[in-house]
Image (tube, rainbow, N blue to C red):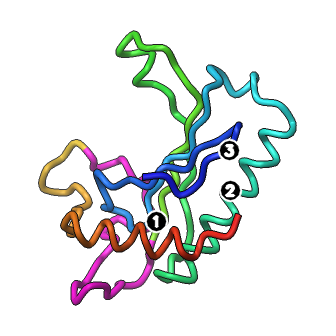
């Protein structure tokens, strides 16, 4: 589900998981960060800034984790491509769709507990709710 698409970048809404409300991937076809042009870096910065604005306005996000790891491609012997994980983080509870969302590891690395089924951040949203989060973000996204 695309929030944005240009010749350089795609912003993909993470409809497979909203364990962090507003989670997206910003991706391009380049294999390495050093392959990015100045124009691509500038556009990336504008996209990240717009995603922050949208998530603060709609959901009250406190801060953001923005990471480019690219480990899995090398581990899995796939062709790497530059992509960033955009993870809004929430100090306070968020009430949405009559549900209480808690970022239970706020202030810590978002993947520290990812492999632990008990401590893992939970995705509490169903398919329809994720679609509505996407629609809210798509409507607000102005870049």
Asked if residue 27 is positioned above or below residue 112 in the image, the reply reads above
Q: Nearer the viewer, mark 1 or mark 2?
A: 2
Ranked by sequence position, the earlier of labels 1 and 2 is: 2
The boundaries of the magenta stretch are 90-114
Describe the element under mark 1 as helix, strand or loop.
Answer: loop
Q: Nearer the viewer, residue 102 or 142?
A: 142
Rounded to the nearest angstrom, the CA distance separating label 1 from label 2 is 23 Å
Residue that label 3 marks:
6
Tag 1 and tag 3, C-beta contact below 8 Å? no
Q: Is residue 99 magenta?
A: yes
Ranked by sequence position, the earlier of labels 1 and 3 is: 3
What residue is drawn where x is 40% and y is 24%? 72
What residue is drawn where x is 61% and y is 34%? 28
Tag 3 and tag 2, C-beta contact below 8 Å? no
Residue that label 1 marks:
107
Describe the element under mark 2 as helix, strand or loop.
Answer: helix
Q: Nearer the viewer, mark 1 or mark 3?
A: 3
Q: Is residue 17 left or right of residue 45?
A: left
Local packing at callout 3 (Cα closer than 10 Å; few below 14, some 14-19, many 20+) is few
Ranked by sequence position, the earlier of labels 3 and 2 is: 3
Q: Is residue 12 magenta?
A: no
Describe the element under mark 3 as helix, strand or loop.
Answer: loop
């Amino acid at each position: 589900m695309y929030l944005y698409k240009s010749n350089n970048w795609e912003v993909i809404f993470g409809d497979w998981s909203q364990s962090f409300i507003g989670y997206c991937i910003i991706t391009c076809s380049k294999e390495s960060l050093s392959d990015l042009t100045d124009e691509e870096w500038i556009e990336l910065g504008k996209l990240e800034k717009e995603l922050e604005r949208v998530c603060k306005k709609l959901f009250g996000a406190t801060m953001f984790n923005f990471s480019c790891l690219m480990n899995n491609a090398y581990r899995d012997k796939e062709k790497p491509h530059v992509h960033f994980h955009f993870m809004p983080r929430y100090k306070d509870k968020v009430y949405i769709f009559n549900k209480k969302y808690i970022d239970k590891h706020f202030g810590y690395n978002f993947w520290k507990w990812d492999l632990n089924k008990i401590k893992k951040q939970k995705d509490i949203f169903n398919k329809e709710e994720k679609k509505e989060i996407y629609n809210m973000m798509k409507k607000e996204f102005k870049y």
